[in-house]
Amino acid sequence: MTNTTGKTTDDVADVSVVPTVEQTNKERNAPKFRHLTRKETLSAYFTIAAAAFGLISDGYQNNLMTMSNVVFKKLYPKEYTSSVSTRVSNSLLVGAIIGQIVVGLVCDRLGRKVALVGTTLLIVIGATLGTAAHGAHGSVQGLFWFLTFARGITGIGVGGEYPASSTSASEAANEKMIKHRGPVFIMVTNFVLSFGGPLAVSVFLIVISAAGEDHLPTVWRVCFGIGIILPLTVFYFRMLIKRYWKPLIGTCGAWFLYDFVTFPNGVFSGTIISSVISDGDIKSTAEWQLLLGAIALPGVFVGALLCNPLGRRNTMILGFSGYLVFGLIIGIAYDKITKIIPLFVIFYGLMQSFGNLGPGDMLGLVSAESYATPIRGTCYGLSAAIGKTGAAVGTQAFTPIQNNLGKKWTFIIAAICGVTGILVTYFFVPDMTGVDLADEDRKFMQYLADNGWEGEIGEDEDLVDDDTSSESVSVDKK
């Protein structure tokens, strides 16, 4: 059938459905909307709130030395000179400069989420080290050098919070409240940073009122310790934005506990054995120390035999159980058991053997197995670093614990770490026994795709042959 123009009706129909160039451009440029899920809607508000709490902690740390300098001058009038005061105070600022630059780069290269979690961890670690700071053999100058180092670590985290929290807050405010982005940004950044000054002094007044001016060492340590709580309030929410927040808590936490116990007990085991030998003979101490090491060594082989049939997680739990059992036995019966040196050395060796059997063998293994290939090195390195932090804290705290609480408490605390290790392992460490690591890689890539990742991961240029490369190029050209 033809119409008056001489074209068939089919031709007319065909023309009517062919879009013009103008229509095509409009469709291409038209914004595409989709409904946000409830989780996505709340995520922006959580990001803004987390930025506020994170920067409050920065404000607190920035002003923590205001009254601490007064306390240190009161406690150590001769040692706390103006140069020492300047060094301890400025260490945070030096660290902050490093953090602002490095984390600023991390924000753009690896993403806000990685930066936020990393800065929070640095503040927690630095604040923990500062709270537990001691000088070797009670050295006052050693104490202030330790504080300088701890405050420097805290400063890197504090400085990193500026680009990490501020940029994420700005982006989240732009997403949910674009008209009020400016005021919201100011309130969750500059206001909370400024609020840190009155907050730090208020905390100091409360603590000194409770402890009294006769306990100034307690006052400054409590004030430093409260600086740990503030970033921890947002750490949970920041970890939720990462797929691997749960195993990270597991591997980092378990490694911290293991190194906290095993390193000081290794370093000071000769001193402990020497103290229970009546004459303190060096040769006898070395002989008992050799027996201790010989008893501890087989645990490595037992752990290797158990990791497959019993499973990684259960083997770790078994190892931490050894800390609990033998730590309690030695700690509770310390005065009696140290009079029977062979029995003491055997139980001490068994405690260390269980440490080798469980967390000693398993931590490196589960840290290598729990994460996908693209982030395995990062998460493994972070877990190991947290472990070495535990070693440093444990070694530093070992002698003060012995001097202030008694030698038996080093074993009782090992038992407490054993209980904590069991709980951390059970709830947070995944058991990857018999699981193909490629399965986790696929799950991770699917997770990235589901969350909008459109890039590529891996050295694909080295892995793709010439035919595939040329084929993909031809597709791109089309």
Image (cartoon, grey):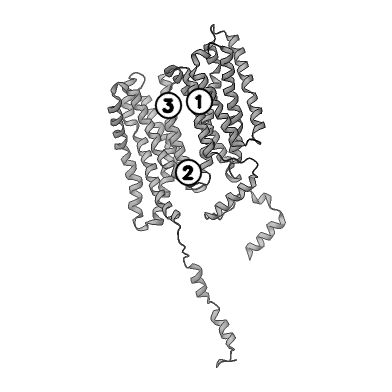
Q: Nearer the viewer, residue 300 or 270?
A: 300
Q: For the residues marked 3 and 1, what is the alpha-carbon distance in whole angstroms?
A: 20 Å
Q: Secondary structure at mark 3?
A: loop
Q: Earlier in the sequence, mark 3 or mark 1?
A: 3
Q: Given this view, does label 3 or label 1 mark the residue nearer the observer?
A: 1
Above or below residue 391? Residue 404 is above
Q: Secondary structure at mark 1?
A: helix
Residue highlighted by disc 2: 239
Q: Given this view, does label 2 or label 3 mark the residue nearer the observer?
A: 2
Kindly identify which numbered label has been placed on residue 273: none
* Residue 323 in which image quadrant: top right
Badge 3: residue crowd in 10 Å (few <14, some 14–19, many ≥20): some
Q: For the residues marked 2 and 3, what is the alpha-carbon distance in whole angstroms?
A: 25 Å
Q: Nearer the viewer, residue 344 or 293?
A: 344
Above or below residue 445? Residue 347 is above
Q: Secondary structure at mark 2?
A: helix
Q: Earlier in the sequence, mark 2 or mark 3?
A: 3
Q: Earlier in the sequence, mark 1 or mark 2?
A: 2
Residue highlighted by disc 3: 132
Residue highlighted by disc 1: 415
Where does the image place residue 363, in percent across and percent down from the top left? Answer: 58, 34
* Residue 360 in which image quadrant: top right
